[in-house]
Image (tube, helix red, strand yellow):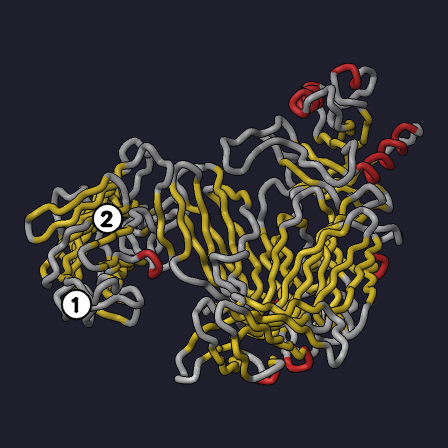
Amino acid sequence: MFATASAFAGYRSYPVEAGTTSTKDVTYTNLGEAPVTLDLATRVNGAPQDAFTLSQPQVTVPAHGTATVQVVAHYDEVPADTTVTGTVEATDASGAPRARTLIGAAQEGARHVLAINAKDRSGEPLGGDLILTGKKFFAPLILDPSGTGTIRIPEGTYTAWLHADLEGANGPRSRGYGELAVTDIVLDRDRTVVIDARKARRLTAVTPRASSLDGVRIDVYRGVADDDYTATSRWPDASYDSVWTLPTGGKVGVGAFELGGHWRLNQPAITISTSGHDFDDAIVHRGAAPLPKGHHTLEAVFAGDGDAAGYRGKGAEGKAVIVRNNDTVSREDQAAAAAAAGAKLLLVVNDGPGRIVPWNDPIYGAPNLAPLTVASLGIDEGEKLIAQIQRGRRTLLHVTSNPATEYVYDLVHRFQGAVPADPAYRPGSKDLARVNVSFRNYRQSRVVESRDDYWRFGYSTATAIGASEAPAIGERTDYVTAGVSWHEAATIVREVGQESIRPVAYRAGTSTDLHWFGPIHRPRSAPGTSPLRQDDLLQVVLPGWGDSGAGHVGGTFLNSMVSNSLKLYQGDTLLGEAPYDQLLVTGLRPERLPYRVVSENSRGTWANPYSTSTRTEWGFTSEAGAAGAIERLPFIQLDYAVNTDVAGKARRRADLTVTPSHLDGVAGAGDLRAVTLEISYDDGATWRKARLDRGRDGWRTRLDAPAAASFVTLRAAARDSRGNTVAQTITRAFGLK
C-alpha cells in the first residue's frame, strides 16, 4: 500500500479572496491480494485542523487497484505569510499506519507598492542608494538617474533614508552629501513618497571659535527594539563641502530614530577673503615654509596652468598666485614654479566638480611637503576670482595664517526622534569639556591622531571618523562634546602607537590634561587584551611602550629598530618565548602551578633618551578551569606619576607616585599591600631604597637627585594578598632638569 507523496495546495499571492479553496487528489494504491479499508485524518501544524478537510473520512482500496480522495485547503484558515504543513494519515482497521501524504498551503499577507520619487536641490531627478527599514524588515533600493524606485512590501510603518550627491554650498559645481530621511511612512495602500532635496537643510556643527572641517561621519539609526534595528554610517570625503538632510516633522511614533554624527573641526590653517566674500571651501596644505602667523594682504595674480610660462610678466614675488588644476602641469611643477617666482601662497582652482586635495601628502607616509603653502578652491568660487583678476582689477586677498593648529573641536550630536527644521548643533563653551593635549616625543615628527566616539554599538562598529595629523612635539587645546565616551589614539608611524585603555568621558566645563609619548614608557595591559588561560593554553599580550599613567597602552607595530620579547616559565623551566609582545603557549599541566612571565623591551637603534630598556617579571599561579572557560590572569599593573616638562625632564626634588592595580575582570587577584621602590641616578650602578608614603593615588616618594645626575632609573615591585607579584626595572625612566 502506498499513497501520493505530497499534495501541496499552492501559494496564493495577495489579495486572496474570501472563501478561496484549493483541492488536490490523494491516490492510494493497493498492491496486495485483498481490498484494504483505510481510515483517513488530517494533522496540521501552525493552523486550525479545519484548514484542510477531506472529501471522505474512509476509503476502500481494491486489491491491485487504486482509490482517490480529495484534500481541500481553506485559505481563510491559513495564516498570512506562513507556510502551513501537515499530513493525511491513513490507518487500517487495527489502527496501524499504512500511508502518509504531506500536505501544505501558504498565502501572502497584505502587500502594497511603495514608490520612491527623489528630487535634487533644483527639483531634477535624483539617483542614489536608499535604505528602507521597518519592523523585522530591511531592504536596500537603488534609485537610478530617473530618481524613481518601487518595491512591493508588507503593510506596516517604514523609515527610508537616501544617500545621494547634491549641489553643495558653494555653487552649482560644488558637491554636497545628502542624508535624506523620511520617517513613519504608513503603508496601508499603494503609496508614493517624494524625497525632495529642495527642502533640505545643512546638517552642521557650529563652533564657538572659527573652525574648518577636518572630517565628518554621518550616522542614522532606526530601531523598534534592541534586537530589531537598522543603522548606517557614512564618511563624506574631502570633495564634499557640505552635508544636507531633510527635516522630518514630528518624532517617530514607535521606537527610536537618530540622525547626526561626529565632526572634527580644526582652527583654520588659513582663511581667505576678498572684499565682501569669504572663500570657505578651501583645503589647505601648509607646506615646508608655511605662511607666517597673522594677517596678510596679498595681491592675487593668475598664472594660467601654473607652468613657468604662466608667470611671464606677472611679478608674482610676495603675492598669491592662482592657477588651474590641469592634466598638463603637475602639482609639484606648479608649486616649484610658484616658489621660484617668490610667491607667498599658491591657490589651485579645481577644473571639475567638488573640492580637490591640494597636495599629495598621505598621512601614513613619509612627509612630502610643498615648498610653500598650497590651497585649493572649488571651480565656482575659483573661477569667479580668476574672472575678477582677468578683468584687470587689482585683487587683494586678505589671508589669516595659523602655521600650527592651536585648537580642535571633536563634536558629536545626533538628533533624537526627528530631524528639526534647523539641523545645526551649536554647543556653547559651557556645553563642552576642555582637553589640554601635549605631544611629548623626544624629537619632532608626524603624529597620526584620532578621537573616536562610542555609539550604540561600541568601539568596534562604525565609530571611527578618520585620523588627523599632529606634531610629535607640541601643545593643543581640544574642545569635546561632554558626556560622550571616546577612544583616543596617537601614532608615530613605524615607531610607536598609543591608545586609551578604556573609554574616556569628560564632564562639561572641566579642563583635563592629556599627554602622549612622554615618560615613563613601560609595559601595560588593557582589559580587553589582558593575559588569559584557557584549558592548557596561556596567551599573553603585553605591549611594552605605554606612557606614564593608567590611561594608555603602547606598542611598536612595524618598528624594526626596537627589541621586544616575552618568556613564560613554570618555576625555572622555560615553556615558551616570542621575539615580540605577544606569546601563545599550549600544553600546560591542568593542576595549579606557579608561573612567571618576563617581558624585556629595549629601544635598540630606536633613538630616544628615555626608557632605553625595561624588564618586567610577573609571578602568578594558574590551573585549568572548566572545559573551554577563559580566565583572565591577575597580572599586577604598575603606573607612575611624575611631573615632567615637554622635554621629559623632572625637577630634582619632584614627587613620584607608584600605583599598582589589577585590571577589571581578572581571576585570582588579592588586595594590593606591599610596594617597594628603588631609585638609581647612575643607570643602575648604585641604588637607593625610597621611602614610600601610601596615599589615595598610590605610594609616593620624593626624588633626591644629585647635581651631576641626568636620568632616573627605577626598580619597583608589588605583591597582593594572593601571592601575585610584579617586579619592574626601567632604565633612564625620565630625565632631570
- Left or right of 299 on screen, residue 65: left
Q: Position of residue 366 (x, y in %)?
A: 49, 31
Q: Position of residue 174 (x, y in %)?
A: 79, 43
Q: Position of residue 219 (x, y in %)?
A: 63, 60
Quadrant housing residue 559: top left
Crowd around label 1: few <14 · some 14–19 · many ≥20 (10 Å): many
The amino acid type, in three-letter code, at marker 1 is Asp
The answer to whether residue 53 is seen in the rendering is: no
The amino acid type, in three-letter code, at marker 2 is Leu
> Which mark is first along the chain, 1 or 2?
2
Q: Could you say which is closer to the camera, residue 562 or residue 337?
A: 562
Q: Which mark is residue 584?
A: 2
The residue tagged 1 is 720
Is residue 729 positioned above or below 116 on the image?
above
**Residue sitting at x 35%, y 59%:** 528
Q: Nearer the viewer, mark 2 or mark 1?
A: 2
Is residue 462 positioned above or below 291 on the image?
below
